[in-house]
Image (cartoon, rainbow, N blue to C red):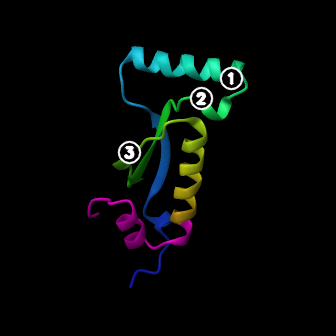
Amino acid sequence: MDERAAAEVYDVVMVDRDGGPLRRAARWGGTIVAGLLDGSGMAPAVSELSIRSDGVELRRVAANDVSELADLHDRILLQLETTTPAEFAESWDLPAH
């Protein structure tokens, strides 16, 4: 049985969201407006999370806003430290590695 933590096999990084320049500009505009209105938690997420192993992206996870993205990132980091590689892969439906 594999007793390693998933963090020894997988990592998670923030990457730019897919989409053309107009979509990115719209998201950044929404972020600026939310910041001006003190609604920073409601700002659209301009990044996604990439779950990787050995530098290879296995899955991207998107969030609607900045708060959701931060919560999701924290949740994944906790899972990486507290689950085995097999448990983590199963919970995120990752391809066999």
Instruction: Give the label on residue 60, or none.
Output: 3
Residue found at x 64% / y 23%: 34
Question: Quick check: 87 above or below 60?
Answer: below
Gap between marks 2 and 1 measured at Cα: 7 Å
How far across and down, in percent of the image, does residue 70 sit?
59, 45
Contact, CB < 8 Å: mark 2 with mark 1? Answer: yes
Q: SS at mark 3? A: strand
Q: Position of residue 54 (x, y in %)?
A: 38, 55
Magenta span has 90?
yes
Seen as rendered, the residue at the extreme left is 96
Tag of residue 35: 1
Mark closer to the observer (3, 2): 2
Q: How many marks?
A: 3
User: What's under tag 3, amino acid-wise?
Assistant: Arg
- Of the numbered discs 1 and 3, the one sitting upstream in the chain is 1
Question: Could you tell which of marks 2 and 1 lies nearer the N-terminus?
Answer: 1
**Residue for badge 2:** 43
